[in-house]
Image (cartoon, coloured by chain):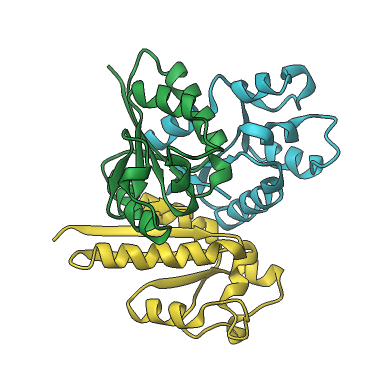
Chain colours: A yellow, B green, C cyan
């Protein structure tokens, strides 16, 4: 089976809406394929992961997480904004440095998409 | 002959001007090389392809198309904005899902550029 | 030793702050690795390289340059803005066409990051 690995990069809060739409469409389009999707947030975009966020589409975020999308946050960005694991959705993975994750995954063959 | 494959991603209307300038410069710079250029528009950026667009640089778009640049639109984005093939320039290709095209082309070795 | 090659693309002045933060974090995170970082500026972003820029964080730019980061400017963009080598920091490299550089480096295996 053809396999697709993709890492989405979102570093601004106002790009989340498009990012989630892009991910949803991709999963529908590749429903019969082996797909691995990571969404890597750094900069201000990590605030979207807060359980108390009023702007986040939590329903869509949760649904995509349940479909296997790996939502990931850069710890440097969390620290810069005085956020920690406790205030984020439990399904969010934290990596020490978001940019390193983007580099590593591209070297592993992931396609890079910046919505 | 060295060969270059590039896919440009544009998802905002105000990024078209820079995108077309980038593509033009690339074609001039690689004039003696084998170059394949795709411009993939999704999101609001697909509106730039409308024949009735008042903001588009139709002359430049047409000229680049005649030089072999593949202007492509995401059908999910067209549907979301109630647009169809009939209102777009005839040289615009439509793909079912723009993000899948970006992923596929990167897996085929295309360089990805987000202007 | 594992080796990491990365090219950052910045084409807007207001993306420099995040770009430099991303590069700094990457160098810290990969301090024990073999890392090659290019920052490619085109479009309006090349103005950040002016020695007389009032908005640039010249201290950080210089420090990163001294750590081996290759700050690069697109000559098409410089010409479009009536700038030349003389008004830029001496550590800035100039390439004829920025987009070609982004394409070439990706083909050489560099990861592409658009902050």
**Residue at far top of view:** B32
Residue A66 appears in which quarter of the rendering? bottom left
Q: Is residue A49 left or right of residue C55?
A: left
Q: Residue at x 78, y 29 (%)?
A: C50
Which is nearer the eye, B11 or B61? B61
Residue A110 in sight: no
Q: Is residue A60 left or right of residue C31?
A: left
Residue C45 appears in which quarter of the rendering? top right
Residue B88: image x %, image y %?
A: 37, 41
Residue B109 appears in which quarter of the rendering? top left
* Vertical side of B91 occupied by A115: above or below: below
Which is nearer the eye, B24 or C93? B24
Q: How many marks?
A: 0
* Vertical side of C23 occupied by C106: above or below: above
* Vertical side of A59 occupied by A76: above or below: above
Q: Residue at x 71, y 50 (%)?
A: C17
**Residue at far left of view:** A1
Q: Residue at x 75, y 38 (%)?
A: C62
* Vertical side of A17 occupied by A52: above or below: below
Q: Is residue C21 left or right of residue B112?
A: right
Which is nearer the eye, B92 or C88? B92
Residue B17: image x %, image y %?
A: 56, 34
Residue B81 in sight: yes
Residue B83: image x %, image y %?
A: 38, 52
Residue A114: image x %, image y %?
A: 48, 53
């Amino acid at each position: 089976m053809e396999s697709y690995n993709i890492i989405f990069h979102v570093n601004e809060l106002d790009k989340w809406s498009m990012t989630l739409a892009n991910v949803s469409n991709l999963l529908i389009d590749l429903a019969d394929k082996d797909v691995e999707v990571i969404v890597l947030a750094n900069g201000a975009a990590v605030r979207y992961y807060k359980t108390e966020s009023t702007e986040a589409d939590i329903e869509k975020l949760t649904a995509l997480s349940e479909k296997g999308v790996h939502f990931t946050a850069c710890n440097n960005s969390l620290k810069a904004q005085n956020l920690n694991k406790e205030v984020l959705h439990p399904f969010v993975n934290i990596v020490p440095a978001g940019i390193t994750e983007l580099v590593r995954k591209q070297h592993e063959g992931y396609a890079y998409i910046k919505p």
